[in-house]
Amino acid sequence: MSTALLAPLTSPYQTFRQVPVPNTRTALYTLSIRYPGALRAPYRVYTFPLSPTALRKTYTAMSTIYDTAGTPTYQGVQRQVDIYGNSPVIYSLEGTTGFNRHSNDAYLFTGLQSIQNLATLLAQYAELNQYQMQAGISTLYTLEFYDYFSNDFWQVEPIGPQGFYQDASQPLWVRYRFMLAGIKRVDAPVFSSLADPIGQLFNAAATPVMTQVQSSVTSLLSTYGIG
């Protein structure tokens, strides 16, 4: 808060100060395919091992303005507004999974394996719904994006160009760039220990998570069929 608000009105100076705030939020981001139906049971879950290097959340204000003839008071032009509302969000994600193993997925996958898992999840989501539609089934699988840093959880749908790319500056790193259209908010992630034991860990408090990760890596490796 500005100390100027506390200074006498006759003070010729204005000073601003900050109060440090410790960061207790978890920079964790997850994509999850959900079975059709009200229970939203998890089908496949992917936790980004590294936070995206860029995460943009935008929306479109759908109101429209019309300029019409006005009075001299309005300098000859009067503006009318057709108020419509705001669209759901659009997420733009860019980043990399690096090359090494990372604590965010309990060291289960290398960076290259992780990017392959991400590509498989997105391809599988499209494939599953194609089977549903060709079978004449109206209920479809859904995709959800969880931003734990902002506590923002959405059902999303990939739109437009999606891709993976590499360049000569860091040839071992594969980068991704996605655009996800928000469909509707979801109250909170739904976890299943069978489908996502890692997600169960990160749904707990930070201190127990670290203890549990250290003590259960062997169990997680077994669950994911590694080792």
Image (tube, rainbow, N blue to C red):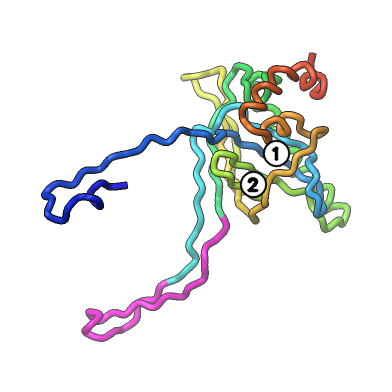
Span highlighted in magenta in the image:
65-88
> Crowdedness of circle 1 by 10 Å Cα count: few (<14), some, many (20+)?
some
Residue drawn 64% across the image and 49% down it: 154
Q: Secondary structure at mark 1?
A: helix
Task: Indicate the position of residue 58 as horizontal and vertical percent values.
Answer: 50, 51
Q: Is residue 21 magenta?
A: no
Task: Indicate the position of residue 74 as horizontal and vertical percent values.
Answer: 25, 80
Q: Which residue is mark 1?
A: 122
Q: Is residue 78 left or right of residue 54?
A: left
Residue drawn 45% across the image and 33% down it: 22
Q: Is residue 195 above or below residue 167?
A: below
Between 5 and 202, the one nearer to me in the picture: 5
Q: Is residue 80 above or below residue 182?
A: below
Q: Which residue is mark 2?
A: 158
Which numbered circle lies on residue 94? none
Q: Is residue 165 above or below residue 80?
A: above
Location of the C terminus (image quadrant) = top right
Residue drawn 56% across the image and 37% down it: 177
> Crowdedness of circle 2 by 10 Å Cα count: few (<14), some, many (20+)?
some
Residue furthest bottom as drawn? 71
Q: Secondary structure at mark 2?
A: strand
Task: Indicate the position of residue 43 as horizontal and vertical percent values.
Answer: 80, 40
Q: Earlier in the sequence, mark 1 or mark 2?
A: 1
Residue 154 visible: yes
Q: Are marks 1 and 2 in contact (CB under 8 Å)?
A: yes
Q: CA distance from mark 1 to mark 2?
A: 8 Å
Q: In which quarter of the view is residue 221 placed? A: top right
Residue drawn 68% across the image and 36% down it: 203
Q: Is residue 75 above or below residue 184?
A: below
